[in-house]
Image (cartoon, rainbow, N blue to C red):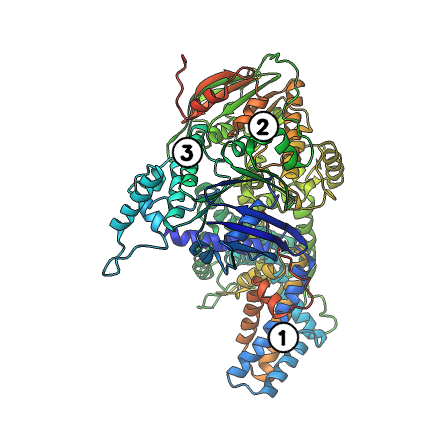
Amino acid sequence: MDIELRGITKRFGHFTAVNEVNLHIRPGEVLGLLGENGAGKSTLMNVLCGLYAPTAGEIVINEQPVRFAGPGEAISAGIGMVHQHFMLIPVFTVAENVVLGVEPKGRVDHLDLARARAQVRKINDAYGLEVDPDALIETLPVGVQQRVEIIKVLFRSADLVIFDEPTAVLTPQEVTEFFEIVKSLRDSGKAIVFITHKLGEIREIADHIAVLRRGEIVGHAEHPNAVSEAELAEMMVGHPVNFDVNKKPYQPGAPMLEVKNLTILRENDDIAVDDVSLTIHSAEIVGIAGVQGNGQSALVESLTGLTRVTDGSVTFKNQDITHISARQRHRLGFAHIPEDRQRTGLIPAFSIAENMVLDSYYDDRFSKGPNMMWDAVNLATARAVVDFDVRTGSVFDAVETLSGGNQQKLIVAREMSRDTDLLIASQPTRGLDVGSIEYIHSRIAQARDEGDGVLIVSSELDEILALSDRILVMFKGRIIAEFDGATADKSIIGLAMAGRYEAAA
Amino acid sequence: MSHAQESTTGLTEALLRRAAPTGTALEDLVVVPIFAVVVALVLGAVAMLATNVELATVGRSYVALLSGSVGSLNALSESLTAAVPLTLAGLGIALGFRAGMFNIGAEGQLLIGGMAAVIAGFSFQGLPGIVHVPLVLLAGAFAGGFYAAIAGWLRAATGAHEVISTIMLNLISYRLVDYLLRLDFIQREGRSDPISQSVLESAELPRLLAWLDPNLRLHAGVFLMIAAVVFIHWLLFKTRLGFEFRASGESPDAARYAGMKAGLIVVLAMCLAGALAGIAGANQVSGVLGRASPGFSAGIGFDAIAVALLGRSHPWGVLLAGLLFGALEAGGRQMQVDAGVSIDLIGIIQALIIVFIAAPLLVRTLFPWGFRKAERVVKE
């Protein structure tokens, strides 16, 4: 299927999300669509999927202009999308999920699951997907769930498959397998759109790259090898990007936080963290790599005093803190950047000033007796906002009006503008633009240079590699490997993240 | 069961979001309520016409509604008298909304608070008014606060949803009051029906306009109402505790991550909400009724939910909404007398107001004027 977007523009009120975009998607080719969050990638693809009607411009399929009244029409025209967040029913089997909404019916109008299974097997064989049609979704790893989404799209006979940030949830090994699948789809003549903000991946898989910035196509590359990552990054961001984090030579000080044999059970008595021991020294960044859902969140919640420890001990500067509260830890000099800024880090409807004192409002600086001293709060916030480069009109604006990068910088400002000894940062730059990532990394490195112990938890291996002095890999609740940050090998860490690592190797 | 519970929770959250806005545009706070009242009155007229009331009678009843609520000194006095308990209990519910609690139990808290106030009101002979009246109010506040704290504690300790537990506590309170009213030391001498002794004169909230006309019922509770509005405004927006309430209400997860104690906040917020409802009950027995009888709460605790919703859980908004509902109640009585229209119509109008408040999009569609054009900015 040959698809052309001609002059596609999409406006929401006065805001132009996509402006005059021309794209040509050819069969048997992978088009890489590169852009930062908010660049308009998703809007553009939602236009193509029939979710939004374009304000101007037209979609041309095989020389025929088309107009979609809704997603249903786009699907029947052969356009399929694999969303970043899977839309699967966990308690249904693979075959049941695949046929959902287009169920094959038998003679007496019953659900013909046998036919559904056979069709899933056929698609399996054609593209080498290897998915058991009778497996329950909830028992499958994320990488396989993604393949189920692909089967869903192919089952609806899509000729154009759009992948929206498909690798975000995959381990490095799963990414490799996923690329093989994409290639086999391409070789069978499907047109593919691959949306991402990851530079390395796009150069590996795309046959043709288009870069989107602020809703406009700002660059093309006919051959991915014709451009370097730095050039792509510059196109994407609009200015040269420095990926290296500047920090002083590694000279760790005394142990700051010592965790011994920590075990944490979830509410359903599953083991979340299994006998973990680790030490964070002063002036050291320890990175925990691992695929999401391997106990990192539970570990961080327990270290910050938010959940109860089942067994083991935590000492901070030789003081036992295993059972003290989050607030007491905050007073001892803990700083915590939570993984979900919208849900746990900030209160989006509150003002910037209110969010700035969310965990220190009780402090003598900001309150007196029962009263809040809002003038002092506003003043301190105004200062911190300038210090930490949070771009906002006023400290009274609601946090929800800020961009993701500025929201995250606000959290960094809140946690690091006071005197701290230990920083625990979970996914500190997830979903941010390159500029904000650079800035937050430099702040974290600065805290380490000033003698703080730092624990970084991230599922972005590149982030762990860029920041860490020591790297620990977490898998199924255990720390299964430790690497030196300066000499670590990305592919070996990747293997360890998938649980395939022998300590001796 | 779990499914039903889940949908209750979902609905509750949707209502809470509507009820406790932070940084909502002025038009949502002011324009929507005004239109809601207008639409409700129009639909009220339609309801009357549909029940074969003549057009002239409809007109006469709305004139009566107006004159009965603000048309004379007596009307104003009646409106204010009715507004006081609605505003007090409404403030409590608004406080709960802000802290993320959907407190349906103001009715029960008001009953329990009122009973405690009555007992305090007739038990202490020979106290001067300046001591006795505050004592009565405090008794109401403590009893109401304690009763609400039960629901708060259940939520904090076991996760039992406060909507369910406060409804149950309401039902318990009805029977408890029936029982208490038949106890020897409470029941009025020589009566076989459940009715309490009258509060002593020293325990009565003083009538303010009795020097003009002894029939004017406006009493000192109106100052109590203003003081409560100011106090709640201070508490919510100027204090640490208020910040904790608002943060937990807006985002329990973020509040927990910030080190706030969710359980304690839940219990405290419910306790304060119950104390306000209890004061509303005390206000009724010592300012208006003079005694307690079965069902003396007269649905004020439920109307107060509407008041809090209409006032968007803002203390001053609650005051305005309380005044409006007070006026509707006083005017409704006049309407019944003058035009012979059932007072239930007032209930219909109040319900319609709430429907339209809860559905601002509907109001916006019906009345495109007065609103900035809706901007649909979809986040990427």
Tell which tag, 2 or 1, sits nearer the viewer: 2
Q: Residue A180 carries which label?
A: 3
| Amino acid, disc 3 | Glu
Where residue A346 appears, x then y in whole percent? Answer: 60, 40
Residue A411: x and y in percent read 64, 35
Q: Position of residue A348 (x, y in %)?
A: 61, 44
Label 1: how many residues lie within 10 Å, few (<14), some (14-19) or many (20+)?
many
What is the C-alpha distance between the residues marked 2 and 1?
A: 56 Å
Mark 2 burial class by Cα count in 10 Å: few <14, some 14-19, many 20+:
some
Residue situated furthest left in the rendering: A107
Q: What residue type is labelled 1?
A: Gly
**Helix, strand or loop under label 3:** helix
Tag 1, which secondary structure?
A: helix
- Mark 1 belongs to chain: B
Distance from disc 1 to disc 3, alpha carbons, whole Å, reads 76 Å
Question: The C terminus of chain A appears in which quarter of the rendering?
Answer: top left
Q: Would you say B204 lies left or right of B73 here?
A: left
Q: Specify the label residue B331 is tagged with.
A: 1
